[in-house]
Image (tube, grey):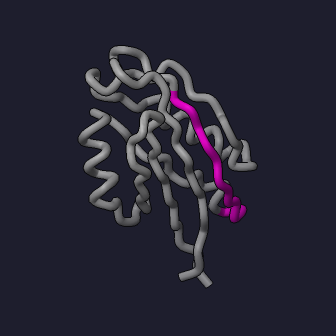
Amino acid sequence: MKHALLFAIAVVMVQASPQLYAQGPHGIRTPQLLEANNKFTTFAPLPGYPLGAEARHLEGNGMFLLHVRRDGSVARVDIVQSTGHRELDEVCISVYGLWRFRTDFAAKTHEVKIPVTFKLSQT
């Protein structure tokens, strides 16, 4: 049976923002995630499943902490909880480091936690 990518990401803003879920990068992004992206970010690509990791059927859950500068750029990404696989952690760190938050949001929030789940499902 062919494996399909089911990638879920939830964005949790540290200062009481709601939890949001989406599937991607080829799945459906929920209206809530799109609304949060528009409300809190100016650029927020989702991490893709690395081909090597997908081929080896690697899955995992992780939590990442983004340290946000006043200008909205990400100063640093820390692993709060590893996905259990270096490849998956590295793609998250790389992509989350590119995120840009709205300056009005960045002025109030200096840290953003992002839980992520990499999961392959049968289709």
- Magenta stretch, residue numbers: 55-66
- Residue 4 percent location from the top left of the image: 53, 72
Q: Nearer the viewer, residue 68 or 118?
A: 68
Residue drawn where x is 59% and y is 80% of the image: 122
Q: Quadrant of residue 25?
A: bottom left
- Residue 61 percent location from the top left of the image: 65, 54
Q: How many callouts does the rendering have? A: 0
Q: Quadrant of residue 22?
A: bottom left
Toward the top, the furthest residue is 70
Residue drawn where x is 67% and y is 56% of the image: 60
Residue drawn where x is 67% and y is 60% of the image: 59
Residue drawn where x is 43% and y is 51% of the image: 19
Residue 36 magenta-drawn? no
Q: Is residue 86 left or right of residue 106?
A: right
Q: Is residue 68 left or right of residue 4?
A: left
Q: Quadrant of residue 120?
A: bottom right
- Residue 91 percent location from the top left of the image: 58, 41
Please determine whether, in this image, residue 100 is positioned above or below residue 70: below
Q: Is residue 63 left or right of residue 20?
A: right
Please determine whether, in this image, residue 89 is positioned above or below residue 107: below
- Position of the N terminus by quadrant: bottom right
Q: Nearer the viewer, residue 55 or 113?
A: 113
- Residue 90 percent location from the top left of the image: 63, 38
Toward the front, the furthest residue is 16
